[in-house]
Amino acid sequence: MGSSDKGLFVQAPAICFTWRFEPDWPVLSVTKNIHRFGYTAEEFLSKTRLFTEIIHPEDRERITAEINVLLTTNTESFQQNYRIITNSGEIRDVCVYSGPLQPNDHTVFYSIVHDITHQRQAEAALVKSEQQFRTVIETTSEGFLIIDNNFNITFANHALCQLTGYELAELKAHSAVYYIAPEFKHIFTQSVNQPGIQLHWREDLIIHRKDGQALNVRLTVTAMDDGTGFFAFITNITAHKKAQIQLQKLSRAVEHSASSIMITDKNGIIEYVNPRFCEVTGYSEAEAIGQTPSIISTKETPPACHQELWSTILAGNNWHGETFNRTKNGAYYWSLMSISPVMDDNGEISHFISVSEDITTQKDQQIKIEKIALYDPLTGLANRRLLYDRLNQSTEILHRQQDAGIGVIMLDLDYFKLINDTYGHDVGDELLKEVALRLTDCVRSEDTVSRPGGDEFTILLQDVSHPEDIKPVAQKILQSLRRSINIDKYSFKITCSIGVSIAPLHTIEPKLLLKYADLALYRAKDCGRDNVQFFSANMRVKHQDGILKV
């Protein structure tokens, strides 16, 4: 080998060495870049068996056999791929080009070693990637196909064959356009024909199965980097489209519903209201969303009603009832409301839906009817029917709780018949109205003042148990009625007689309470009128038909 050949050999970028084909393949020379395998040139040359030892054990026999064959055929140069073991124990893939040299009448061999580890790793990764890609494409539930620029189908996965009902060979027999419904063909071809403008696009189309059935599908198309065609995923959205159409119908029904509809999250925060809600309440959609239903609530709604409502719907049940509400401008209205909980996939409450009807007109009519049925048309006080109803309710509570009492005050105006006969019924009626006002001012809001008829008034007092609880009220009534009452040009000074019974002190039966108060009233009249008498067991009262004993 000449000096110039040696210089070229030493400066070569690959690892180069010479060796003789003898037992153990002794190495004669090596370039300094042997350090890439962790050796110095001196270390590599100092060990005569080093060359064979660095070849991977699994490749040594194959390499030796290949070289024997190549030498017997007088091959001038040859290439072999095998693995070597570096000084640190790392395994590297190499490509080795070898050939004979004949300096000084004896044969030596040269070898040029290229490290192809990264290339092999890249090739393996590519193979793995292709395998994974094919696995994904063949196992995915979505249809997948590859088309060229002429819309010819070059590949389709199993899912697409199942979706369309065609075998792969049948699919390839036609272009992709063939399977698309006529009204969508131009959309597909226009999009695919613009690869330079649109590398990715998505479109909802209708395709036809082999059996003629129409399918709503979503195409997601990507142009290949080399410009030779397209990849496309096809998703069956037929069920989704049907649900979407149904949802649109429901949405239009809700939007145009004559009922007020409100949807809240599980914490009661409003997320949706329909136009009717806005019309009834006066709140715009923007004003209502983010608020709670309390924006239309009133203080007149009893807390117990709210508690019962929430306990019902939080238990997953529907609630139905009447609510008294307030609009944005302060006007009151009645609603017949239904509230239903909405469950998520885990069976947990996610939302509440409220549907309500404005029943203000009907409620006003009902209230008017009830007022006629339950209230005295002259004074506006409770009539006999309402008095009996409230007295029965109060005594029922006493039966259960027995922690408080009730009082019944019964009174007559003294000599009212004389006023009525002398001045006329119109004046008498005005007098009764004023008496009703004064009696109402003498008691609390939870007490009931009633006019069963004529000049007779009955008052039901709550939470009283002893005469000492009632005496101040009775004295207040006497004093109030003693004040002058002016009607037209007349001025009247009237008095009244009062009888009182107490439950459970005297009895707990409603009819007996009224009877005992009536007996006490007669005693007050017998005692000169303008006084108060409490029932006692020794009372006697004279009636037209004889003596009533208690």
Image (cartoon, rainbow, N blue to C red):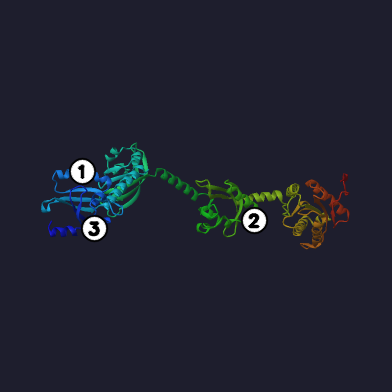
Disc number at residue 90? Answer: none
Point out residue 398 in the picture as x, y percentages from the top left corner: 75, 49
User: What residue did someone put label 3 on?
Assistant: 42
Q: Secondary structure at mark 2?
A: loop
Q: Secondary structure at mark 1?
A: helix
In the rendered structure, which amino acid carries the disc numbered 1? Answer: Ala
Q: What quarter of the picture does the N terminus occupy?
A: bottom left
Query: Which circle's residue, 2 or 3, is located before the other in the chain?
Result: 3
Q: Is residue 242 above or below residue 524?
A: above
Q: Judge left or right: residue 299 versus residue 135.
A: right
Q: Nearer the viewer, residue 354 or 375?
A: 354
In the rendered structure, which amino acid carries the disc numbered 2? Answer: Glu
Q: Is residue 36 above or below residue 23?
A: below
The local crowd at label 2, few if under 14, some if 14 to 19, many if 20 or more residues have their Cα within 10 Å, is: few
Q: CA gap, disc 2 to disc 3?
A: 103 Å
Q: Nearer the viewer, residue 274 or 247?
A: 247
User: What residue did someone put label 2 on?
Assistant: 300
Residue 362 visible to the viewer: no
Can you tell which of label 2 and label 1 is closer to the viewer? 1
Query: Which circle's residue, 2 or 1, is located before the other in the chain?
Result: 1
Q: CA gap, disc 2 to disc 1?
A: 104 Å
Disc number at residue 65? Answer: 1
The local crowd at label 1, few if under 14, some if 14 to 19, many if 20 or more residues have their Cα within 10 Å, is: few
Query: Which circle's residue, 1 or 3, is located before the other in the chain?
Result: 3
In the rendered structure, which amino acid carries the disc numbered 3? Answer: Glu
Q: CA gap, disc 1 to disc 3?
A: 29 Å
